[in-house]
């Protein structure tokens, strides 16, 4: 069974999220949208778009989106079979959060790493 197949997103907190978003937009050219982040479309070696995106997002430091972790970041990893991976992680003694989500964006689950960082696991919808 494959475990992680790629990075689906990078999320981090900022003391002044709008100012930091503006800095990244101005100085690094990241197309920060009103929701606080950007979606990087995957391309092949010739620059042609292919299925898949990586999300990059800055949120306010007051957000509890990463709870129970106190880290100022969270990485979202793409997986092929979320339910199978969650089962294996639990069998291996990992701290997998009970909550799982499913939406038009795919299936999501979370695990806490040994240093207390919340890690998001994401199985994208078919075709992505």
Image (spheres, rainbow, N blue to C red):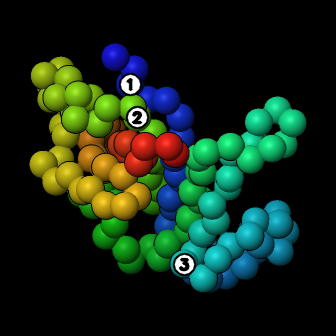
**Callout 2: helix, strand or loop?**
strand
- Image point (60%, 69%), residue name: 37
Marks 2 and 1: CB-CB under 8 Å? Answer: yes
Q: Say which label, 2 or 3, has the lower sequence index.
A: 3
Nearest the camera: 28 or 6? 6
Nearest the camera: 12 or 116? 12
Residue neighbourhood size for the residue with mark 2, other residues' Cα within 10 Å, grouped as few (<14), some (14–19), many (≥20): many
Q: CA distance from mark 2 to mark 1?
A: 6 Å
Q: Position of residue 120 (x, y in %)?
A: 36, 47
Question: In this image, 64 relative to 50: left or right?
Answer: left
- Image point (34%, 17%), residue name: 1
The residue singled out by tag 2 in the image is: 79
Q: Position of residue 127 (x, y in %)?
A: 50, 43
Q: For marks 2 and 3, give the one nearer the viewer.
A: 2
- Image point (51%, 61%), residue name: 12
Q: Say which label, 3 or 1, has the lower sequence index.
A: 1
Q: Position of residue 86 (x, y in %)?
A: 22, 33
In the picture shown, does residue 84 fall above or below 82? Answer: above
The residue singled out by tag 1 in the image is: 3
Q: Position of residue 89 (x, y in %)?
A: 22, 27
Number of marks in the rendered image: 3
Q: Which residue is most to the front?
A: 127
The residue singled out by tag 3 in the image is: 35
Q: Is residue 40 visible?
A: yes
């Amino acid at each position: 069974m494959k475990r992680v197949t790629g990075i689906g997103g990078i999320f981090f907190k900022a003391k002044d999220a709008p100012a930091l978003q503006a800095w990244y937009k101005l100085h690094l050219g990241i197309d920060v949208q009103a929701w606080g982040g950007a979606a990087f479309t995957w391309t092949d070696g010739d620059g042609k778009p292919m299925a898949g995106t990586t999300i990059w997002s800055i949120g306010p430091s007051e957000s509890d989106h990463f709870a129970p972790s106190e880290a100022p970041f969270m990485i979202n990893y793409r997986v092929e079979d979320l339910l199978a991976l969650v089962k294996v992680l639990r069998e291996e003694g990992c701290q997998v959060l009970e909550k799982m989500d499913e939406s038009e964006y795919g299936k999501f689950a979370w695990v806490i790493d040994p240093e207390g960082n919340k890690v998001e696991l994401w199985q994208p919808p078919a075709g992505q």
